[in-house]
Image (spheres, rainbow, N blue to C red):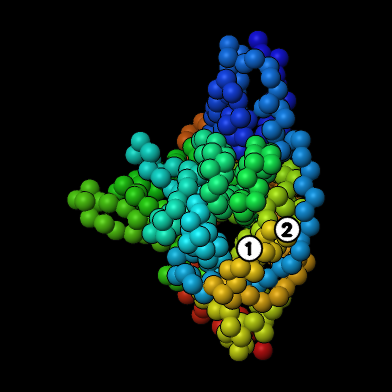
Amino acid sequence: MAKITLFHDKAECCGCEACVNICPQKAIHMEEDEYGFRYSCIDASLCVECGLCQRVCGYKQVEENNVPVSTYVACTLNTDIMKSASGGIFASLAKSMIEQGGIVYGVSMETISGELTPMHIGVEKLEDLIKLQGSKYVQSIMGDTYQQVKKLLMQGRKILFSGTPCQVAGLKTYLGDVGNENLLLVDIICHGVPSVSFFQSYVKELEKKLKGKITEFRFRDKSSGWGLVGKASYLTAKNQEKSKLIYARESSYYQLFLRGDIYRENCYSCKYASSNRPGDITLGDYWGIEHEHPDYLVANGGDFDEAQGISCMIINTSKGKEYVKQVSDGLRLGTSTFEKVARKNGQLRYPTKSSERRQMILDKYVNGGYQEVDAWFKRKNLIKMPFVFVLDRIPVAVKKKIRRMLKR
């Protein structure tokens, strides 16, 4: 039996896969638990007890000490903002990196064995950047991404790596000092992550309702404005291409995600849900912009359009500050503060709280599949769903105008 123990409690493992990537014996692999969450496991017959896996665990071994250098309201000026979830800042930063001959790593929704699977991949062509754009409300599979990044950095290539804070921290500890001058780290404001298996089960249930095969799933679609509306593209039995908007308040998956009911165990005690971020830059939606900076908005004579989406950008290091300075011609920026951004982005201050419903929901999933979870959600929301159906189809811009009129 191997004497190395990676974790004693599931709350100690974030699933970043740094230990898998660093093991010289390939003795560590990822296995799903009964809820679909992936955890690292050691093959005792291959382990030589070198201890590298324990030392590389940034989640347990390293305390981040970065503090915000500066904070901005932001949106892109040199990419198509409508293809991004919020203000398109990731796309702008990534575009500049590719134009410098660099490679950008992020999450793509790949089709593997016929199933949509969130995977970390690298792209070095502008036409491939779309794969990494948009929010993915599910944990991505890292695979050998850290190994790829290290190899490229050792070759002198420039890399922009984006991911959840724990994935960014995992890469930092894996690399050590390798290629730091050529690496830009971008973390996202993360609520928490559901499992790949849970998401794929949701997609299968949605396919039954649509009577088709989903070929693309975008968690954030802007056809009705900046907000929480997804879009599923699918093929019918007659091979016709169709699409379906997924309204967050009508979707069991979205609601369970937004309420924090289906995250992996460590998300509820995440140490990165604070001002001490592992990335050089932190990106997210600027929720609450209408309260914090109303003068910035187009509706009030400013330059930022709520209908198209607005980002917040937090600079955490001198490297992040210098990179933003270099690419600033492609950005529209307005000064803000960390405190203002954090008011409606609670995960910049504390982790999501685990709900009393979580275990019950996960048990339903284990015993009856996603079908049982969805059925429970519908029974619970039966009365209010007709009202939600009507309200959701009012364009976001119209809703905002109505709210402004009511406040007068």
Q: Quadrant of residue 299?
A: bottom right
Amino acid marked by disc 1: Tyr
**The label number, if any, that marks residue 323 in the structure image:** 1
* Residue 112 seen in the current view: yes
Residue under the point 48% across and 34% down: 368
Q: Are marks 1 and 2 in contact (CB under 8 Å)?
A: no
- Can residue 375 be seen in this snapshot? no
Q: Identify the residue shown where x is 65% and y is 51%.
A: 181
Q: Nearer the viewer, residue 65 or 366?
A: 65
The answer to which of marks 1 and 2 sits earlier in the sequence is 2
The three-letter code of the residue at mark 2 reads: Thr
Question: The residue tagged with tag 2: helix, strand or loop?
Answer: loop
Along the viewing direction, whichever of 328 and 58 lies nearer the viewer: 328
Rendering coords of residue 203 (x, y %)? 42, 46
In percent of width and height, residue 329 lies at 56, 75
- For residue 230, side relative to residue 235 (left or right): right
Q: Alpha-carbon neighbours of circle 1 within 10 Å: few (<14), some, or many (≥20)?
A: some
Residue at 71% over, 38% down: 59
Along the viewing direction, whichever of 235 and 146 lies nearer the viewer: 146
For the point 42% across and 60% down, the residue is 126
Tell me: residue 251, above or below residue 202.
below
User: Quick check: 287 above or below 300?
Assistant: above
Q: Is residue 399 left or right of residue 294?
A: left
In the picture, the quarter occupied by the N terminus is top right
- Return the x and y of residue 210 as percentages of the image width and height: 33, 52
At mark 1, the secondary structure is helix
The quadrant in which residue 58 appears is top right
* Gap between marks 1 and 2 measured at Cα: 10 Å
* Residue 179, x across and y down, in percent: 62, 45
Q: Which residue is mark 2?
A: 317
Q: Which mark is residue 220?
A: none
